[in-house]
Amino acid sequence: MKNIVIAACILIASFCSTIPGMAEEKASDFDTFLTNFDYDTRADMKTDSKKLLKLLEEKKAVLVDIRFPEETRAWRMGFGLFIPLNELPKRLAELPRDKIIVTACPHKDRSSIAMAYLRTKGYNARYLTDGLIGLAENLRGDSAKEFLEDAGLVKP
C-alpha cells in the first residue's frame, strides 16, 4: 500500500512538472499535501465498499469512476460519475466540493493517484480500497443480500 501512495506521489509530481508555467504552483500544492501527510491522513484517504454504499445512501459522497473510456464501454457500475483519470484536471468543476469524492478503478492504483490529486486541489477525497472489482463482487448473486445487511443498508 505504501508503494502505491509513493507511486501516486511521483506520478502527480511528474505530471505537474510537465505543464508549462504551472509546475511551481502544482508542485507547491503537492508539497503541501506531502508535508501534512500523517497517519490520520493515511486512514482518512481510504474507504471500502461497505462504507462507500453507506456514504452514498446518506448522500455524503460521490463515486467517481476514473477508468479509461475503453474500460467503461465493457462494463459500468450504473451509478456515480465517469471522469477518466487523464481528464480529471480539466473536469474538476463537475465535482461537488460539499461531498466526499470516492475515486475508483478496478483495483486501486489509479484511484489512489486520483485521490492524491484531488486532495491537493482541496477536495475531501478517498479511494475505494477494494476497487470496482471488489464492489461488483460484493453486489452480485447470493452475497449481495448479506453484504447490504452487513453495511446496514437493508434489514435482515
Image (cartoon, rainbow, N blue to C red):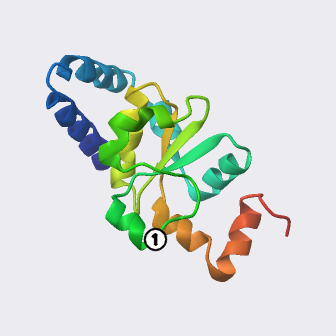
Q: Nearer the viewer, residue 102 or 77?
A: 77
Q: Position of residue 10 (x, y in %)?
A: 21, 38
In which quadrant is the C terminus drawn? bottom right
Query: Can the viewer see residue 1 in this picture?
Result: no
Front-lying residue, 92 or 25: 92
* Residue 24 higher or lower than 137, as above or below: above
Left or right: where does residue 128 sit relative to residue 37?
right
Q: How many marks?
A: 1
The location of residue 13, given as percent across then percent down, is 21, 32
Q: Position of residue 94 (x, y in %)?
A: 49, 37
Under circle 1, the secondary element is: loop
88 w.r.t. 29: above or below: below
Q: Residue at x 42, y 31 (%)?
A: 119
Q: Count neighbours of disc 1 (C-alpha within 10 A) and say few if under 14, some if 14 to 19, many if 20 or more.
A: few
Please identify the quarter of the rendering in which residue 35 is found. top left
User: Could you tell me which residue is drawn at 50 percent across and 67 percent down?
Assistant: 134
Q: Is residue 43 left or right of residue 121?
A: right
Q: Residue placed farthest to the bottom in the image? A: 142
Q: Position of residue 74 (x, y in %)?
A: 40, 73
- Point 39% across, 22% down: residue: 36
In this picture, is 76 found above or below 32?
Answer: below
> Does the image show residue 67?
yes
Kind of residue at disc 1: Trp
- Nearer to the camera, 22 or 100: 22
Rendered position, 111 above or below 135: above
Question: Label 1 belongs to which residue?
Answer: 75
The answer to whether residue 140 is left or right of residue 89 is right
> Left or right: where does residue 60 sit relative to residue 136?
right
Image quadrant where residue 49 sits: bottom right
